[in-house]
Image (cartoon, rainbow, N blue to C red):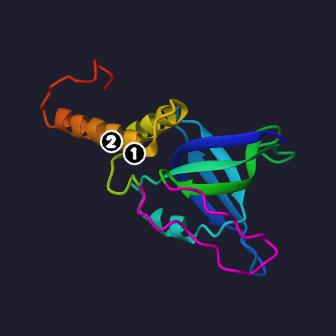
Amino acid sequence: MSNYEVMGNLKKVMDYSKDGKPNWYAIINDSDDKDHRAYSNQDLTSFNSQLSDPNAVVLVDVKGETAIHKSGKNAGQPYIKNAIITRMGDEAKPSVPAQTNKARSEPTREPLSQGMTREQGMLTIGIWTRGITSGKTPDEIKTYCDAALEYFNNKEKGVDDEPYNGQF
């Protein structure tokens, strides 16, 4: 199987767990406004509680294996199976095999997108997406992202000192 990775805003999580075995379904909206479906054996309860706010922007990185829906309304469409879902900027934790009942650890850092508008969240996704593939360190990407968000917020307030060559 090939690898499937997507970064974006977590739109929905649903819990289909049975008999103590985590089984979650998630929809992730990427920076091109395309939805991706993922299935995970992680406990995504913390994400579920954040999504109770309809305006929440929860930026995530999702990695897993490519699979194709065999039936239903999504027949023939790709999805991510065995998905590992982490908040943008957090490192993936090793997963506990599904056969055990050990508690899975969730990332402890607050999501980068907490308190952001959708536009700010999408800007952050784009910066991290391009930054990761550029070979920059996470600290360099975060510094650039913080500066870009500050510029974006100032521009929204009417301050326009253009250091980004019209990117925004």
Q: Where is residue 146 in the image (x, y as percent from the top left)?
A: 30, 43
Disc 2: which residue:
143
What residue sits 39% from the left and 54% below the top?
Answer: 55
Q: Where is residue 166 in the image (x, y as percent from the top left)?
A: 28, 19
Q: Position of residue 133 (x, y in %)?
A: 54, 32
Q: Which of 35 and 95 is in front in this view?
A: 95
| Residue at the extreme top | 165
Against 14, residue 120 (above or below) is above
**41 horizontally vs 43: left or right:** right
Q: In which quarter of the image is the N terminus?
A: top right
Q: Residue 139 carries which label?
A: 1
Q: Nearer the viewer, residue 127 or 153?
A: 127
**136 horizontally vs 69: left or right:** left
Q: Do the residues labelled 1 and 2 touch (CB within 8 Å)?
A: yes
Element carrying mark 1? helix
What residue sits 82% from the left and 75% below the top?
Answer: 99
* 108 drawn magenta: yes
Element carrying mark 2? helix
* Type of the residue with mark 1: Asp
Q: In which quarter of the image is the C terminus?
A: top left
**81 horizontally vs 29: left or right:** right
Magenta span covers which residues? 90-111
Q: Main secondary structure of the magenta part?
A: loop
What residue sits 14% from the left and 37% below the top?
Answer: 157
* 15 drawn magenta: no
